[in-house]
Image: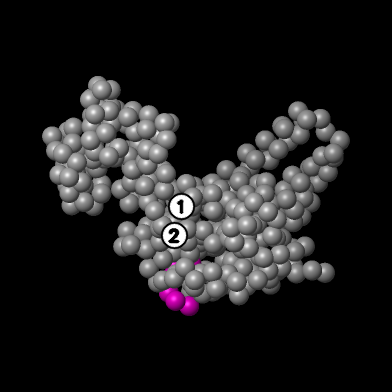
Amino acid sequence: MSAIGNSNIDDLETEKQDHRFGNLDQLSALELVATMNKADAEVAQAVGAQAADVADAISEISKRFATGGRIIYAGAGTSGRIATLDASEVYPTFGVADRVLALMAGGRDALVESCEGAEDDQQAGRAAAEEIGLSKNDALVGVASSGSTPYVLGALEYANEIGALSVALTCNADSPMGKISKHKIEVVVGAEVLAGSTRLKAGTAQKMVLNMISTITMVQAGKTYGNLMVDVVASNKKLRRRALNMVQLITGAKEPDALTALESHGWSVKSSVVGIRLGLDHTQATELLSASGGVLAVALGERS
């Protein structure tokens, strides 16, 4: 009988067969769509059941981020790819570079090619965390459906040794990862529609929680104005249009005036808004924003 980490694979909820779906290969395409959709609806409920644990972890992550720390995800296979996706989207959305990273078992090649055996190397996880200079100011979030992936365990163990915040995001209860981490988020989604295929419900649950971790941390770091992504990096036509719409929405400026402001303020939504509202040039607006901790509402005098 094979084992993963300290847990027998047969004991994992995510590896069991859900007999509700035992006739999967006999269903029509429409029936399969309905079946999977119904199963996916259970994921949001499972995430909601762990809301307090998610919030507690995010509060601690945000504290470290506010003092210059980083968020480091560590994962393998589907979990690692989902974590890498979340990390890669932080810069274009919030303008934050090099402070949300992902460690992927097997490295970059494993993002697009199967390298599943890399997850069994516990020392590699430790070495990866050490190589990026993980420090006590950082938060390391280990992501694994099983909760016992050796690569992730190695990274979490190193995080604990140096005093970094350790968080385990798993889809099984009482996991080895959860037991060694300062915070654990155990979203128990149960058996998959396709037995053992944790890229399904488990992967969806992980994506939902990682969305919360990165987005809420950035909201608390002042990277939004209301629910607007005012630190967006306007690097393509769609994002420039989004930036223009936000400047108009916040200031009430006509499109030509908003566009002129964006062009003179280096396509920074925050600086453009401050410029229009307070009559400041780009340098003055940037200085005010810096003195306001980068929080647009503070720079505008709407809150302290």
Q: Mark 1 points at which residue?
A: 213
Q: How many neighbours does mark 1 have within 10 angstroms: few (below 14), some (14-19), or many (20 or more)?
A: many
Q: What element carries label 2?
A: strand
Amino acid type at image mark 2: Ile
Q: Is residue 38 left or right of residue 259?
A: right
Q: What stretch is highlighted in magenta?
A: 161-166
> Quick one: 228 or 44, which is closer to the camera?
228
Q: Closer to the N terminus: mark 2 or mark 1?
A: 2
> Where does the image place residue 252, in percent across and percent down from the top left?
24, 25
**Residue at the location (55% across, 73% down)?**
126
Amino acid type at image mark 1: Ile
Q: Is mark 1 on a helix, strand or loop?
A: helix
> Where does the image place residue 72, in percent across and percent down from the top left?
47, 61
> Quick one: 174 or 62, which is closer to the camera?
62
**Residue at the location (23% across, 32% down)?**
261
| Quadrant in the picture for the N terminus | bottom right
For the question of whether residue 276 can be seen, the reply is: yes
Quarter location, residue 147: bottom right
Q: Mark 2 points at which residue?
A: 71
